[in-house]
Image: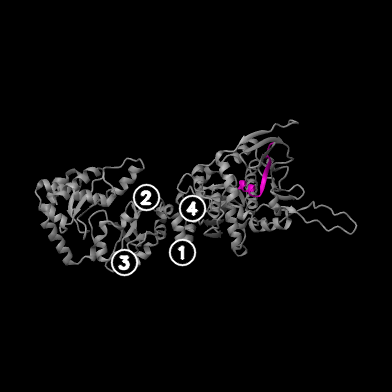
């Protein structure tokens, strides 16, 4: 190592500069969280080395006892957090502390608003807790030596746009984070203050967090001796290994923040220890708020995996399906080998068994929350409902349980809030009703005002109103719930079963027979534009509508595929008209030329009501103006 190490200057990534500014100005009302974040990072570094040492014991031969140490120097005004974990090389320091190497960074920053509470939650979800040190420090130093190497480096920054790197010395592996505290933040040098923060936020950390024992009072006439012996100030026991009766709600909440780096408390959690054929412990959490990149199905996800209390990996995605990617937690198995890899997990029967158990645990947790606290569950649904819907098409084994957790808007309420469960719907069903009816559309207003609902409103039949982009796809996989078939009111022939009496059915047949000549006239005009023309029994106030044939892709699904850049089939609708509507009777009285204009106008109106747009609005407008002038 050179006697005169060269100092290198580097600029922060642009996003880091923005983040540092927002970090300091968004979280100053809860400054003490910086210590929780830095201790959590130190614990992660220890966990990573503990796992690496399973294959290479030499990495910890010189110091096998892991620890995190907090030391305060009042004279220098510094607070140091040290660990003997995996450490960092020069390249690691530059990569980890100078850039944010995550996808979606720009989107994340665009959501930061200046609102302390909201921004604190987003910052926590993004997992950049190291920078929280600048809330209380005007300069930070990081001295680190990677395990298995002899070289150490120092990283220095005032958090204002650039950082410096130089070679240095460190006697052992690990990392020191040295905070040069602002004059206004010297309270964080106080021994009692530090111990209380550690007890509040880091008691659950399985690595001992040590501080110097208070010095013994000096005897009269003697000089006081400085403290030299360290003691653990946290329980240093993995929280999930403790009995549920010994863990407080506050401890559960703080552990969640530790593993998730979320600043908000969890919505709910489940802690279970299973013994028997398989032995494992799971501690699973449902967050309150969705992360900014929730819709990125490729994002890191999963639980922290431990085997026999030894940390194995973050984001073990094999234990939860993609539609439960919002779940956080810990899984500790006694049945997996310590040297387990992601590849081995993928093909392991134990993995599949644990996954099935975790999925049932999460779905059971949500079902319990829905029954116990409808308001809290509504908050969950508003945040994560659209992701949960993915499970209808991806997890057939649990489809009915997932369906029971769905919430919908419906004609029962004049609001777009999705608060109606399928069980609620069935409970309100007419005795003669044997189907669950729903409609999908591009917006709530389009669904609510669809002419397809007219006969249902007339008969007092509730219809579920679905307008999220995923709904058409999700509902195509859900055929029934609790023995009741789900039926789209915009597809196939309308069959109301026992909801129609004999007189209504006879009248339907009579109208169909009398309307055959008019059906043929419409077919002649509409030609290849439609698959068929029929008399409608759905409409009471509108002249016409379009529907999809039973078993065919709906027009809504075809539009979604086209919008996503996928090849969509040319779906031809069935045109249904109401022969008793004044516009239809007026059209029927016209000669062929005028009838053609009316037929095409009615068809375009029906398409407009169904989809909200037309392929050729100009022609529609000219035809409408022409008929208005004639009138």
Find numbered disc 3 in the image and state the secondary structure of the residue it sits on: loop
Please tell me which of labels 1 and 2 falls first in the chain.
1
Percent from the top left, x then y, of residue 608? 26, 50
Residue at left 60%, top 65%?
245
Q: Answer yes or no: do the residues labelled 1 and 4 have beta carbons within 8 Å? A: no
Disc 1 versus disc 3: nearer the observer: 1
Find numbered disc 1 in the image and state the secondary structure of the residue it sits on: helix
Percent from the top left, x then y, of residue 422? 37, 62
Disc 2 versus disc 3: nearer the observer: 2
Please tell me which of labels 3 and 4 falls first in the chain.
4
Residue at left 61%, top 46%?
131
Find numbered disc 4 in the image and state the secondary structure of the residue it sits on: loop
Q: Answer yes or no: do the residues labelled 1 and 2 have beta carbons within 8 Å? A: no
For this rendering, which residue is in front, 359 or 280? 359
Please tell me which of labels 2 and 4 falls first in the chain.
4
Disc 3 versus disc 4: nearer the observer: 4
Q: Which residue is mark 4?
A: 290
Q: Which residues are magenta?
A: 129-151
In the rendered image, residue 170 lying in the magenta stretch gets the answer no
Q: Which residue is mark 2?
A: 469
Q: CA distance from mark 2 to mark 3?
A: 27 Å
Image-based side of 337 in relation to 173, left or right = left
Please tell me which of labels 2 and 3 falls first in the chain.
3
Q: CA distance from mark 2 to mark 4?
A: 18 Å
Image-based side of 231 in relation to 324, left or right = right
Question: Colour scheme used in the picture?
Answer: one colour
Q: CA distance from mark 1 to mark 3?
A: 24 Å
Q: Which residue is mark 3?
A: 429
Please tell me which of labels 1 and 3 falls first in the chain.
1
Q: Which residue is mark 1?
A: 375
For this rendering, which residue is in front, 282 or 435? 435
Q: Answer yes or no: do the residues labelled 3 and 4 have beta carbons within 8 Å? A: no
């Amino acid at each position: 190592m050179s006697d005169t190490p060269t100092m290198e200057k580097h600029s922060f990534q642009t996003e880091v500069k923005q983040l540092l500014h927002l970090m300091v100005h968004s979280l100053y009302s809860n400054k003490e969280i910086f210590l929780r974040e830095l201790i959590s990072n130190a614990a992660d570094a220890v966990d990573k080395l503990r796992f690496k040492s399973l294959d290479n014991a030499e990495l910890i031969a010189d110091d096998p006892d892991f620890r995190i140490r907090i030391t305060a120097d009042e004279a220098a005004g510094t607070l140091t957090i040290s660990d003997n974990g995996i450490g960092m090389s020069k390249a690691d320091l530059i990569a980890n502390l100078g850039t944010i190497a995550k996808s979606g960074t720009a989107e994340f920053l665009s959501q930061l608003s200046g609102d302390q509470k909201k921004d604190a939650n987003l910052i926590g979800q993004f997992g950049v807790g190291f920078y929280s040190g600048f809330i209380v420090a005007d300069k930070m130093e990081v001295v680190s030596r990677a395990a298995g190497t002899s070289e150490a480096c120092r990283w220095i920054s005032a958090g204002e746009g650039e950082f410096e790197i130089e070679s240095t010395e460190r006697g052992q592996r690990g990392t020191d984070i040295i905070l040069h505290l602002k004059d206004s933040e010297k309270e964080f040098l106080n021994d009692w203050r530090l111990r209380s923060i550690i007890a509040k936020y880091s008691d659950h950390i399985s690595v001992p967090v040590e501080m110097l024992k208070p010095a013994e009072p000096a005897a009269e006439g003697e000089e006081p001796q400085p403290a030299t012996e360290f003691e653990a100030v946290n329980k240093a026991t993995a929280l999930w290994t403790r009995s549920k009766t010994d863990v407080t709600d506050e401890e559960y909440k703080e552990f969640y923040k530790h593993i998730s780096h979320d600043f908000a408390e969890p919505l709910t959690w489940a802690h279970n220890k299973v013994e028997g054929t398989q032995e494992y412990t799971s501690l699973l959490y449902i967050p309150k708020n969705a992360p900014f990149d929730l819709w990125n199905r490729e994002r890191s996800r999963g639980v922290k995996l431990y085997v026999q209390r030894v940390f194995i990996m973050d984001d073990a995605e094999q234990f939860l399906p993609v539609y439960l990617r919002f779940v956080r937690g810990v899984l500790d198995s006694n049945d997996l080998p310590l040297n387990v890899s992601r590849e081995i997990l993928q093909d392991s029967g134990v993995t599949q068994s644990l996954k099935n158990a975790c999925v049932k645990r999460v779905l059971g947790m949500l079902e319990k929350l829905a029954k116990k606290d409808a308001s809290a569950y509504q908050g969950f649904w508003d945040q994560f409902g659209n992701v949960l819907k993915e499970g209808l098409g991806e997890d057939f084994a649990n489809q009915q349980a997932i369906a029971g957790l769905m919430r919908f808007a419906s004609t029962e309420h004049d609001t777009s809030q999705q608060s109606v469960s399928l069980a609620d719907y069935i409970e309100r069903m007419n005795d003669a009703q044997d189907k669950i009816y729903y409609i999908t559309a591009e917006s709530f207003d389009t669904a609510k005002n669809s002419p397809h609902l007219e006969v249902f409103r007339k008969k007092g039949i509730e219809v579920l109103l679905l307008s999220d982009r995923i709904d058409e796809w999700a509902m195509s996989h859900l055929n029934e719930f609790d023995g009741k078939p789900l039926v789209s009111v915009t597809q196939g022939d309308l069959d109301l079963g026992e909801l129609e009496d004999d007189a209504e059915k006879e009248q339907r047949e009579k109208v169909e027979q009398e309307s055959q000549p008019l059906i043929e006239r419409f077919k002649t005009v509409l030609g290849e534009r439609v698959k068929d023309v029929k008399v409608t029994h759905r409409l009471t106030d509108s002249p016409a509508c379009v529907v999809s044939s039973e078993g065919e892709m709906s027009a809504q699904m075809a539009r979604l595929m086209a919008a996503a850049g996928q090849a969509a089939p040319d779906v031809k609708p069935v045109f249904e008209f109401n022969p008793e509507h004044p516009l239809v009777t007026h059209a029927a009285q016209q000669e062929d030329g005028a009838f053609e204009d009316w037929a095409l106008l009615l068809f375009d109106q029906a398409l407009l009501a169904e989809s909200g747009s037309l392929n050729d609005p100009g022609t529609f407008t000219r035809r409408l103006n022409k008929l208005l002038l004639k009138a």
